[in-house]
Amino acid sequence: MDWSLQLSILAPALAAGLLVLATHIPLGREVLRRGIIFIDLAIAQIAAMGVIAAHSLDWDVHGWETQAVALSAALTGAVLLGWAERHLQRQQEALIGIVFVLSATGGLLLLADNPHGGEHLRDLLSGQILWVNWVDLLPLALLATIFWLVSWLFPARLAAWLTGKTFYLLFAVVITVAVQVIGVYLVFASLVIPALAVVHDSQPLRHAFLPGVLGYGAGIVVSVWLDLPTGASIVWCLALAGLGYRLSIRPT
């Protein structure tokens, strides 16, 4: 086995997971606090529909036009859901579900005449994390750096952003970047599973990285070892790592 070749493939994938966790764990805690578990699925699916719309126009998947369309779609959805939180709180979960199903089926409609539509949709849902390169990680690295610099230099400002009206806009930006690298399923798992695993912990933010890193590392290794889909393998390993943490660590 060519270990240098394996490392050149696995290292960017694991780095992508660590960068995603760096922003998704704090956002996931806020999602749990607000009780809007499926908002990430809805906004991730909206961003994916934006990518599909750009793809249907034959735009470069990694071009600025595609990024602009995906981000605009996600921000529009974020504004709508933020408005619903303030004015339609009792119906918010239902609205999140409607937004999700409309964006999911909208993507199907846009890909109806595309002979490779099924493959493209699968890539957006499951992701292609095993095939990312270091250049693909630059947007994730930039977001994670900004996020933690603000957290370190202006913690009160970041807390206000997360708990205030700007949460949905920040959420949309982070999700739009992540979903194009790791896919919709891994975005949801990265947001919810580590945060849920440490929900009763006295230091949830720091400790949530343990099941997150274990899940990504084990999932990548298992997928390569058994030749299984990487995204799905990571989701299952995240779930097992989160469950193991909850069972082994006494809540404090």
Image: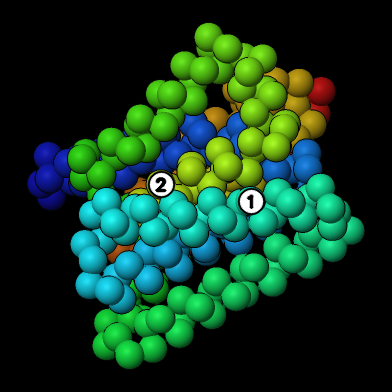
Q: Nearer the viewer, mark 1 or mark 2?
A: 1
Examine the rendering and report whether any part of residue 177 can be seen: yes
Hey, which residue is sitting farthest top in the picture? 153
Q: Which residue is at a point 69% across and 24% down the rendered structure image?
A: 160
Q: Which mark identifies residue 63?
A: none
| Residue 61, horizontal then vertical, whole percent | 26, 61
Q: Is residue 95 left or right of residue 181?
A: right
| Residue 143, horizontal then vertical, whole percent | 41, 32
Query: In the picture shown, does residue 49 fall above or below 241?
Result: below
Residue closer to the observer: 206 or 223:
206
- Are the residues tagged 1 and 2 within 8 Å (C-beta)? no
| Residue 66, horizontal then vertical, whole percent | 31, 58
Badge 1 is on which residue? 79
Query: In the picture shown, does residue 81 fall above or below 195?
Result: below
In primary-sequence order, the first of circles 1 and 2 is 1
Q: Is residue 198 left or right of residue 230?
A: right
Query: In the picture shown, does residue 186 fall above or below 169?
Result: below
Q: Which residue is at a point 49% across and 25% down the rendered structure image?
A: 147
Q: Residues within 10 Å of mark 2 (few under 14, many from 20)?
A: many
> Disc 1 to disc 2, how far (Cα)?
18 Å
Element at label 2: helix
Q: Is residue 27 left or right of residue 88?
A: left
Amino acid on which disc 2 is placed:
Val
Element at label 1: helix
Badge 2 is on which residue? 177
Q: Is residue 205 left or right of residue 120?
A: right
Amino acid on which disc 1 is placed:
Val
Residue closer to the observer: 136 or 206:
136
